[in-house]
């Protein structure tokens, strides 16, 4: 379940210490399990599945409960990058995602690119899109090149 609340989102440079302070500022305890979840997300170079976060250190139910709590205070959000399990990342790490429907590679999008794409969609349809929960889906440059050479 995705729950968006007002709150101070994490940034790409969020430290574990800052995230723990945010959790405490919301009146929540920083349990060992919650700390492990935060440590995994801070260290990750990409969004992680709950299974990847759990690894061998936590039970899956505990990971999901903590992710839901962290999402409710705006520290974490989940994203669907394809037909696989949902993934989780710190809020504010990326402005959006693009996923290749041919090879499955997902690429983070910077804020400037997302702003430009959103402006085109809004001008054409009046709809204000968001690309943080679901990616833009298409073909990556490598798969586009392969297809044109075939």
Image (cartoon, helix red, strand yellow):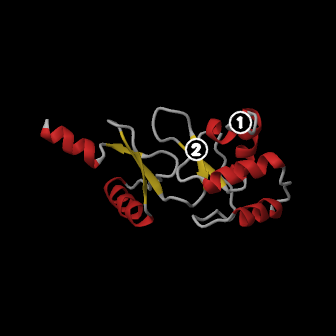
Relative placement, left or right, of 58 versus 122 is right
Sequence-wise first label, 2 or 1? 2
Image coordinates for residue 114, horizontal then vertical, percent? 41, 60
Residue 112: x and y in percent read: 40, 67
Q: Quadrant of the C terminus?
A: top left
Q: Is residue 108 left or right of residue 66?
A: left
Q: In this rendering, is residue 142 above or below 14?
A: above
Q: Is residue 66 above or below residue 11?
A: above
Distance (Cα) linking label 2 and label 1: 15 Å
Query: Label for residue 8?
Result: none
Residue identified by numbered label 2: 48
- Give the residue displayed 51% in from the left and 41% down from the top: 80
x, y percentage for residue 37?
Answer: 71, 48
In this picture, residue 54 sits left or right of residue 34:
left
The residue that appears at 34% across and 37% down in the rendered structure is 103
Q: How many marks?
A: 2
Secondary structure at badge 1 equals loop
Q: Nearer the viewer, mark 2 or mark 1?
A: 1
Per the image, label 2 sits on a secondary structure element best described as loop
Q: Is residue 68 above or below residue 124?
A: above
Residue 48 position, x and y percent, is 58, 44
Q: Quadrant of the N terminus?
A: top right
Quarter location, residue 126: bottom left
Query: Which residue position holds label 1?
Result: 56
Q: Residue at x 51, y 52 (%)?
A: 132
Q: Nearer the viewer, residue 68 or 46?
A: 46
Q: Residue at x 20, y 45 (%)?
A: 145
């Amino acid at each position: 379940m995705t729950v968006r609340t007002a709150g101070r989102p994490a940034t790409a440079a969020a430290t574990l210490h800052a995230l723990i302070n945010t959790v405490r500022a919301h009146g929540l305890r920083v349990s060992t399990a919650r700390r492990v979840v935060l440590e995994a997300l801070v260290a990750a170079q990409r969004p992680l599945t709950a299974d990847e976060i759990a690894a061998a250190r936590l039970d899956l139910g505990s990971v999901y409960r903590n992710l839901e709590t962290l999402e409710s205070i705006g520290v974490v959000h989940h994203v669907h990058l394809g037909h696989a399990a949902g993934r989780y990342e710190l809020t504010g790490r990326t402005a959006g995602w693009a996923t290749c429907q041919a090879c499955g590679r997902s690429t983070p999008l910077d804020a400037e690119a997302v702003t430009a794409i959103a402006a085109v969609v809004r001008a054409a349809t009046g709809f204000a899109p968001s690309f943080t929960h679901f990616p833009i889906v298409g073909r990556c440059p490598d798969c586009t090149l392969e297809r044109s050479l075939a």
